[in-house]
């Protein structure tokens, strides 16, 4: 029976890893559909190569930083217990690799390829796993202090803060260092729309992300005996809440309609194992409102050219999810309990500060040493031709 349990747990977390791996196709197509046609190839290549760099950085450095585990032993020892530890690495890698995938959407259409890959290695190898270890592996004693002081540790079941808020705030730092796309905001105060190239591809990316998210959340249990149907239903309800509010507030705009469910899913990650489904519905709805309002403000009033809105979607909705867990996880709002609002607030703020500071440092150094942006001519031609020497539809672009 023990051997059967080990095999079942390894299969369970492997399926979760595959589902979250598939989400990276969602990141790619969401970005592909949102950017202009001349940057579609770059979106596809960037997500794939970022994942490859993330794998090497996390395997060699990041996983050890977060959990004190390394794989520099013989294959025989790695295969013990059905290779569960290796499969667990694979699962957590897909979370870590989501950070550069999130950042990618914010810096789209004007970032150089090489410096972004260097940033990916630094973020996944050091910046992200340091906070991951604090939140999920008792590093630096923060969780013990929070429990002694406020009665409960910082709770983030599936990464509202650890993954999404961290990715979103690193993304904001990168966007600020890069500056807006060429001619996005003109000196006379006018704005160029830069509309999406493909609503169908945008929608496809959102659907792939939403489906894979049930592996992201449910399989965060990591073993079969901890599987919770509550997590699945809460994820569903938050997704629905985010969709309905975003459609209503976004006046039926398809970009808001398809980012609304993602906002809800981002927010519910932290407390999906604790909330009542009606609480998850509210949390998702608030996240949908946050995304619509803050995306509009950042783009139109504050003139922050965050192409996919990764700061409001992941950074702010993720922070809301971490705090909301301390509210809707309480028994008086139908939750299971065992959480502290103050622990959630402190843990969320620390994650935000660490991510934003780390993002400013990494991208600031790269900007000073290597440069982050394409030249104005390269940006005008598009990242596809400037970096990859081919467009998304080369057969239509050939001159006969």
Image (cartoon, rainbow, N blue to C red):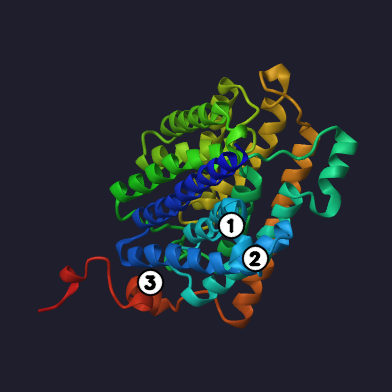
- Tell me: 160 left or right of 299: right
Task: Give how far across and how far down residue 131 sits, in percent.
Answer: 72, 55
Looking at this view, name the residue that lies furthest to the left: 400
- Identify the mark nearer the N-term, 2 or 1: 2
Which residue has dot 3 on it?
383
Q: Are marks 2 and 3 in contact (CB under 8 Å)?
A: no
Q: Secondary structure at mark 1?
A: helix
Q: Secondary structure at mark 3?
A: helix
- Identify the mark nearer the N-term, 1 or 3: 1
- Could you say which is closer to the camera, residue 281 or residue 26? 26
- Tell me: 379 left or right of 52: left
Q: Secondary structure at mark 2?
A: loop
Q: CA distance from mark 2 to mark 1?
A: 8 Å
Task: Give how far across and how far down residue 63 sits, in percent.
Answer: 66, 61
Q: CA distance from mark 2 to mark 3?
A: 37 Å
Which residue has dot 2 on it?
71
Mark carried by residue 86: 1
- Identify the mark nearer the N-term, 2 or 3: 2
Location of the N terminus by quadrant is: top right
**At x 51% / y 35%, what residue is drawn?**
288
Q: Are marks 1 and 3 in contact (CB under 8 Å)?
A: no
**At x 88% / y 43%, what residue is drawn?**
145
């Amino acid at each position: 029976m023990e051997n059967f349990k080990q095999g079942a747990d390894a299969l369970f977390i492997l399926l979760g890893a595959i589902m979250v791996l598939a989400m990276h196709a969602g990141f790619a197509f969401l970005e592909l559909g949102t950017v202009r046609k001349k940057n579609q190839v770059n979106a596809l290549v960037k997500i794939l190569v970022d994942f490859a760099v993330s794998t090497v950085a996390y395997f060699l450095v990041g996983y050890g930083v977060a959990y004190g585990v390394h794989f520099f032993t013989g294959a025989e020892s790695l295969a013990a217990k059905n290779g569960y530890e290796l499969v667990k690495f694979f699962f957590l890698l897909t979370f870590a690799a989501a950070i550069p995938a999130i950042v990618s959407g914010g810096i789209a259409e004007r970032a150089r390829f090489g410096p972004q890959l260097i940033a990916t290695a630094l973020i996944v190898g050091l910046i992200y796993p340091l906070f991951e270890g604090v939140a999920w592996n008792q590093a630096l004693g923060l969780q013990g202090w929070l429990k002694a002081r406020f009665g409960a540790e910082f709770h983030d079941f599936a990464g509202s803060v650890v993954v999404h808020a961290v990715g979103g705030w690193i993304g904001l730092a990168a966007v600020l260092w890069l500056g807006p796309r060429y001619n996005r905001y003109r000196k006379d105060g006018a704005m160029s729309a830069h509309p999406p190239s493909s609503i169908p591809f945008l929608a496809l990316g959102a659907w792939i992300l939403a489906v894979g998210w049930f592996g992201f959340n449910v399989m965060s249990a990591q073993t079969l005996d901890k599987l919770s149907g509550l997590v699945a239903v809460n994820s569903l309800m938050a997704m629905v809440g985010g969709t309905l509010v975003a459609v209503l507030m976004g006046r039926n705009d398809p970009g808001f309609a398809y980012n609304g469910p993602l906002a809800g899913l981002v927010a519910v990650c932290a407390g999906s194992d604790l909330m009542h489904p009606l609480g998850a519905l509210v949390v998702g709805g608030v996240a949908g409102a946050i995304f619509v309002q803050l995306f509009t403000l950042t783009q139109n009033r504050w003139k922050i050219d965050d192409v996919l809105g990764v700061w409001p979607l992941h950074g702010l909705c993720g922070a809301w999810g971490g705090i909301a867990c301390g509210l809707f996880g309480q028994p008086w709002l139908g939750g299971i309990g065992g959480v502290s609002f103050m622990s959630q607030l402190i843990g969320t703020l620390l994650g935000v500060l660490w991510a934003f500071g780390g993002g400013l440092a990494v991208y600031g150094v790269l900007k000073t040493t290597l440069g982050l942006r394409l030249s104005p001519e390269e940006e005008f031609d598009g990242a596809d031709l400037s970096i990859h020497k081919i467009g998304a539809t080369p057969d239509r672009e050939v001159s006969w």
